[in-house]
Amino acid sequence: MRTQKVDPENVDMKLFETFSELGYDGASMEVLAQATGLKKASLYHRFPDGKREMAQYALSIVEGWILQNIVSVSANKNLKPESRLKKVIAAIDELYNGGENNCLLRTLTVGTDANAFKEKVSNCFNLLADAFIDIAIDMGLSPKAAKQQAKLITPLIQGSLVLAGATGDKSYFKNSLAQIPELLAA
Amino acid sequence: MRTQKVDPENVDMKLFETFSELGYDGASMEVLAQATGLKKASLYHRFPDGKREMAQYALSIVEGWILQNIVSVSANKNLKPESRLKKVIAAIDELYNGGENNCLLRTLTVGTDANAFKEKVSNCFNLLADAFIDIAIDMGLSPKAAKQQAKLITPLIQGSLVLAGATGDKSYFKNSLAQIPELLAA
DNA sequence: GTCTATAGCTAGATAGAC
DNA sequence: GTCTATCTAGCTATAGAC
């Protein structure tokens, strides 16, 4: 067969999901092959540099998602900042499936090759924080206060996902999202 | 040699540290052996059920630490709630070394054997949340409000450690700790 | 209680047919 | 571009000397 057996977009999504759930060390090539529906050798054909490249690629998917669903929304001055905030929060809610999904940015911070991903992960977190700063300033906060609150919100989202996943209590996530507008109130 | 070559307490600490840093899958027996200074076979002598038992043991260390440094402090009605809160925050600051250390509770939530640790991890998080609820009520919050704020604080701590580790910016952790008293203000 | 040595397996990665 | 088959290295875990 000359054509791709598996829809590339679906492969991307499966890589993202598998690394998110199991982390870098936990996502073995065999698991990744089964998740994507491709054999190991086929994965190496698409990602010659192997597992590390697959994880980097999954990270770039996240980065693109952030740019499209967070950064571009936060920078859209045609909308009221309150509306932008609402859209951003809704997007985050959907990305993490109401608190059921792990965050790839977090899972890739732990493990044998964590250093290889640190730059991209750090950049993604900075994009998120900057987006909230942007919105917060437009909502009337001083730059300093905006920065301080954004540095609370991004951790809060991350941690609520940790707690929601660990305890099974998704209200950790839901409540944290609900608290964000208050944290940015002038 | 009949006696233990390595101080057991030091072995405990090294297991805790190694699992915290690398996670379950990332902490190989070889790495654990080098970290503790014991050979692999010696580790199996102390932990007959292998790596999973070692991680469970590390978790029980954390649980004990929480009971001693958080729960018992939060329940000490001889101290003003504000003083208890201060002590608890200081203890957390020290445990995570000002934001430099990963949290074992988090690292063990991801990986191939995450389910095996879920019960203990969940229990630890509940202990932490309950301790903050306890203090919050004594500070004057309604039980409902106390619960709500505690469900913000535990995630905030966790997430700030994720961000601090990922970005290298420890102010995420420091600022989050500093924000706790305000979050519990009546 | 610690060690050396090794079993048995799975990991990531590659060769080469189709 | 996908596959089967396989390599080597590393993994968890065990056996048995001291």
Image (spheres, coloured by chain):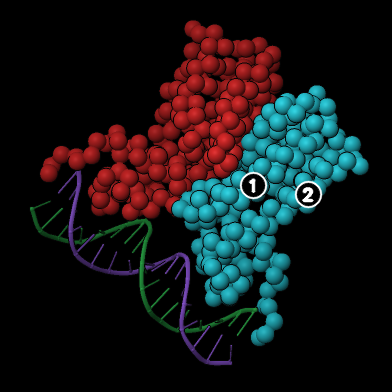
Chain colours: A red, B cyan, C green, D purple
- On the rendered structure, is A6 left or right of A98? left
Residue B42 x %, y %? 58, 75
Q: CA distance from mark 2 to mark 1?
A: 16 Å
Residue A39 x %, y %? 25, 50
Which corner quadrant of the image does residue B86 belong to? top right
- From what the image shows, is residue B185 above or below residue B7? above
Q: Amino acid at mark 1?
A: Asn
Which residue is located at x 40 percent, y 43 percent?
Answer: A18
Chain of the residue under label 2: B
Give A74 or A38, whichever is nearer the viewer. A38
Chain of the residue under label 1: B
Q: Nearer the viewer, mark 2 or mark 1?
A: 1
Which residue is located at x 30 percent, y 49 percent?
Answer: A33
Mark 2, Cα crowd under 10 Å, few <14 / some 14-19 / many 20+, is some
Mark 1, Cα crowd under 10 Å, few <14 / some 14-19 / many 20+, is some
Residue B106 x %, y %? 58, 46
- On the rendered structure, is C6 left or right of B69? left
